[in-house]
Image (cartoon, rainbow, N blue to C red):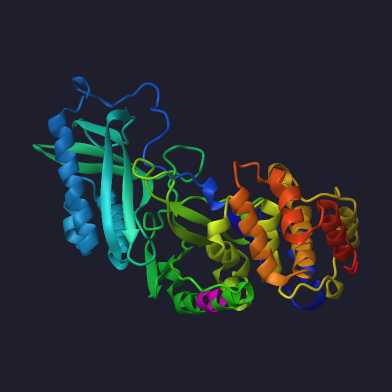
């Protein structure tokens, strides 16, 4: 996941925020694809009815899989009533929740949708009124948005089923709000509150329903920034992107900072590991919903994240100092450290930093320092070959990639591409940082 700092301030004050207030980034490869948990939960439980825990049979599993097939078909067709026909008719609150979900899906261009049920693993069922039989298997929802995704994104779902008479219904559904569980979703903004949706070519943009007035401006702003970023990087603009500015989904940690200090994070979307080895099916940028107005008002706020998006083929194979340094370089292009000012205390902190390129394992321990050091290192390299040579460097890392310890490749690839040693890059970076007014 990558992060963009909260905003821009004009003139020389820009780098006070830009360098002192930064956001942590993680490569999309850190977002694991998920179709089934790596390990089955320990003991399974089901709520006790009058005759003890309910044990579903193949007949019951066949019934809920048929129900889920009807539910997916209804979502693809945008048929809200058919979708609600799969929901327990005895629960008005659940029906209201599921109506929002069905309506959100109907607003999206859902190309494919399916549910995969693990018949071997039951977990504690959600609360359902009454003593009717109920159970909750491990499940994964697959949803593909037309154009925006090349395949379905896989998200675990927590769905309990209840039998009313001779029919099974969805009896409860909730969703993890943190990333600390195997049942946490990758990206599922259609579950939660009502949303508004806009399409621009292959790009899908989502906002909360009560922020609909920001939607058109957000579409235009992101589109303009894609064109600008692609021009700086000298690459073809891509638009197969999900831009999520809703309050739904995970309670995203907007990087190493508190939520109010960061604007956006970006990450890859992945399909089921059962059919592909962590295959990426799309890309997403999650915008802090509290800062949508800032994203519209402040030019270029998205360029950091869009650099990661446009360079997504290098994510995971380039060291963090390089990927984040390039994103910072583009965000503040053209980087001219002599025109920027930082506080005395922060300048001293920068100058006291270790004279080395930040490695991945330590990058987030002091992001306020490591981001500007990385940006300065890239700016120094860009003076010796421009963006074309930077792309050559990233390709060299990808070609030499063996495992996650990509920092070990740095001495070799720097000599190969730039004929310099790491200490020369570091020295050049700190010479640029020393130009900061303070």
Furthest-left residue in view? Answer: 166
Q: Looking at the image, is 306 positioned above or below residue 94?
A: below
Q: Is residue 247 found left or right of 56 in the rendered image?
A: right
Residue 146 picture location, percent across and down: 32, 65
Task: Give me the residue at 81% from left, 52% from top.
Answer: 422
Query: Of residues 350 and 322, which is closer to you in this image?
Result: 322
Assign the C terminus to one quadrant of the image: bottom right
Along the horizontal axis of the image, is 180 left or right of 64?
right
Indicate whether residue 144 is drawn in magenta: no
The quadrant where residue 40 appears: top left
Q: Main secondary structure of the magenta part?
A: helix
Q: Residue at x 60, y 41 (%)?
A: 403
Q: Position of residue 369 (x, y in %)?
A: 79, 54
Q: Is residue 331 left or right of residue 29?
A: right
Position of residue 236 measured from the top left corner of the image (x, y, whole percent) = 52, 74
Residue depicted at 37% across the width and 48% down the height: 154
Q: Is residue 134 above or below residue 103?
A: above
Where, by quadrant of the figure, is residue 329 drawn? bottom right
Residue 5 visible from this viewpoint: no
| Most foreground residue, 330 or 347 | 330
Q: Closest to the observer: 288 or 240?
A: 240
Let me know if residue 222 is in the magenta part.
Answer: yes
> Splitting the image into 4 quarters, where does residue 229 fall?
bottom right
Whole-percent x, y for residue 32 in the image: 48, 44
Give the extent of the magenta segment. Answer: 221-226
Is residue 362 in view? yes
Question: Number of callouts in the render?
Answer: 0
Residue, x 32% and y 47% (percent of image)? 141
Q: Is residue 309 left or right of residue 277?
A: right
């Amino acid at each position: 996941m990558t992060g963009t700092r909260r905003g821009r301030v004009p003139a020389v004050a820009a780098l006070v925020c830009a360098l002192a207030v930064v956001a942590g980034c993680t490569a999309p490869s850190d977002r694991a694809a998920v179709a089934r948990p790596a390990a089955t939960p320990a003991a399974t439980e089901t709520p006790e009815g009058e005759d003890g825990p309910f044990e579903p049979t193949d007949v019951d599993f066949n019934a809920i899989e048929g129900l889920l097939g009807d539910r997916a078909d209804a979502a693809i067709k945008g048929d809200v009533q058919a979708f609600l026909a799969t929901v327990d008719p005895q629960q008005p609150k659940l029906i209201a929740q599921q109506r929002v979900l069905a309506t959100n899906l109907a607003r999206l261009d859902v190309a494919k949708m399916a549910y995969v049920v693990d018949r071997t693993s039951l977990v504690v069922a959600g609360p359902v009124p009454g003593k009717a039989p109920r159970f909750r298997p491990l499940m994964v929802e697959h949803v593909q948005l037309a154009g925006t995704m090349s395949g379905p994104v896989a998200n675990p779902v927590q769905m309990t089923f209840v039998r009313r008479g001779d029919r099974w219904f969805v009896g409860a559904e909730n969703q993890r709000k943190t990333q600390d569980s195997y049942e946490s979703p990758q990206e599922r903004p259609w579950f939660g509150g009502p949303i508004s949706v806009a399409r621009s070519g292959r790009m899908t943009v989502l906002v909360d329903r009560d922020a609909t007035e920001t939607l058109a401006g957000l579409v235009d702003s992101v589109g303009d920034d894609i064109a600008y970023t692609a021009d700086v990087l000298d690459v073809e603009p891509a638009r197969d992107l999900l831009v999520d500015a809703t309050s739904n989904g995970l309670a995203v940690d907007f990087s190493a900072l508190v939520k109010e200090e960061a604007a956006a994070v970006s990450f890859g979307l992945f399909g089921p590991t059962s059919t592909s080895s962590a295959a990426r099916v799309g890309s997403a940028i999650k915008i802090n919903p509290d800062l949508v107005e800032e994203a519209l008002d402040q030019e270029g706020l998205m360029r950091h994240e869009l650099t990661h998006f446009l360079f997504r083929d290098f994510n995971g194979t380039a060291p963090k100092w390089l990927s984040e340094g390039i994103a910072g370089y583009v965000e503040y292009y053209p980087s001219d450290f002599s025109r920027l000012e930082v506080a005395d205390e922060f300048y001293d902190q920068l100058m006291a930093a270790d004279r080395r390129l930040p490695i991945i394992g330590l990058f987030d321990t002091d992001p306020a320092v490591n981001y500007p050091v990385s940006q300065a290192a890239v700016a120094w390299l860009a003076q010796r070959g421009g963006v074309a040579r930077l792309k050559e460097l990233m390709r060299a890392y990808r070609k030499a990639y063996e495992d996650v310890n990509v920092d070990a490749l740095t001495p070799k690839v720097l000599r190969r591409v730039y004929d310099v040693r790491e200490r020369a890059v570091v020295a050049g970076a700190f010479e640029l940082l020393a130009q900061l007014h303070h």
